Image: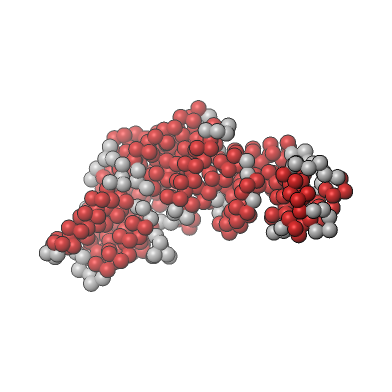
Amino acid sequence: MVGQRIRYYRKTKGLTQEELAQGICSVSYLSKIEKGDARSSDEVLNLLCKRLGISPEEEDTDEILGLLDEWNLLMVNRHTEVAAEMFKSIREKINNTHNPEIILRYKIFQMRYYLIPQNRDLDIVDKNIQEIEKTFEHLTPELVFFYYTCKTIYFSEKGNHVQGLELALKAEAISKEVKVRSAFLGHLFYLIAYCYSYLSAISPVHTYAFKALSIFDSEYLYSRSADCQILIGISFRRANNFDEAEYHYNQALKYALQFKDKFISSVIYHNLGLVYSCKMEHEKAIKLYEKVLETRNQSDYNTAPTYFLIASAYFKLNQFDDCQTYITKGLENIKDTKNNPHFFHLKLLEYRLGSFEFEDFEHFMTKNAIPFFQQNNHWEFTSEFCEVLADWYFEQSQYKKASTYYRIANSSRKHIV
């Protein structure tokens, strides 16, 4: 409706009703036009649209709507190269439309496009969020679903999994009232499981990952099925059910090897290595971690997590020179030492290697590492670091401080369910 378009463009241009109506019609009449309550003259509509720089003519939106939905589906299904080609043609067509719903749909799907790793541009995403928030009232329930889904990805990219989860659960509530494609619903369930996984909440990961897996299998979206198998494997590993974890990782690996997906293969090797580390089979773990380094393009990959795992395995094998070598490699790979969890893991391992004989160990743990994990709701690591510090205090005969950190460690474990 032309009234909705007038209201949308008035708001995007930052005009009040008084400013737009000046010299054309009364404010009350403009308000009725925007709400669709008035039968307005062509002359008034033409003047309002001219001031806004838009056409008063209604558009045929079927073609562009179909293209936008197909583009979104390609991105969800990880057909990124085809999606990039389609983006070029969509961008040309979108310049010729003044339909608010089409433009908002485009901005939301464009957010998803620029959250794909090879296209990543958070400045564009931030700009789109600001523009969408200004005209949020124009979003249909379906568009709110897509917007919350994309913002979940956005917050997860920034490491804010709590806020991402809140939006994903809101999207789930909307999905019960609005019909969306099963692939989009499966993707949402996966995102919810992903956020819960980062928050170390085992039971919800199982609930949502299995829901997503069922949808992806039925849609033959095996790349996405592999993602779900990995999350399920991680949750079983955290629950010390290593056989089940290994089973689900190997299910994912079947896909990765069949379709020669190097990235997914490297993620699986990483997690299988963790299983073997937990089973105290450190030589096997190291071989798998080395496969990660071989499989990935190291210029595009943060190698610090893998270096940490190799260093940890060598530490447990009492091969301390090799351990220090990989600690050094890992630390050299980290630029932001304040916001990278692997910096804290590597530093703690280095303290262990030196039998904690460092003057700044207590300060590092109490002022840097533990607060970081608490603030980011990383309860598994909060518990681990608190227990290490409590043991150290106990050995120093500082029993009151030891008791405090044992208590924090136990409290943190309650978040892991």
- The residue sitting at the right extreme is 43
* Residue 367 position in % (x across, y down): 30, 66
Residue at figure coordinates x 71%, y 58% from the top left: 16
> Of residues 218 and 100, which is closer to you in this image?
100
- Residue 119 visible in the shown view: no
* Residue 162 position in % (x across, y down): 42, 50
> Of residues 52 and 31, which is closer to you in this image?
31
On the image, which quarter does residue 305 sit in? bottom left
- Where does the C terminus fall, quadrant-wise? top left
Where 227 falls versus 10 (above or below)?
A: above
Where 170 falls versus 360 (above or below)?
A: above
Where 9 falls versus 240 (above or below)?
A: below
Residue at figure coordinates x 31%, y 45% from the top left: 416
> Of residues 310 and 8, which is closer to you in this image?
8
- Where does the N terminus fall, quadrant-wise? top right
Residue at figure coordinates x 34%, y 38% from the top left: 203
- The residue sitting at the left extreme is 397
On the image, which quarter does residue 120 sit in? bottom right
Is 59 on the left or on the right of 11, as rendered? right
> Of residues 404 and 342, which is closer to you in this image?
404
- The residue sitting at the bottom extreme is 359
* Residue 9 position in % (x across, y down): 72, 52
- Residue 169 visible in the shown view: yes
Is 396 on the left or on the right of 184, as rendered? left
* Residue 186 position in % (x across, y down): 50, 35
The color scheme shown is secondary structure
Residue at figure coordinates x 39%, y 44% from the top left: 196
**Total labels drawn:** 0
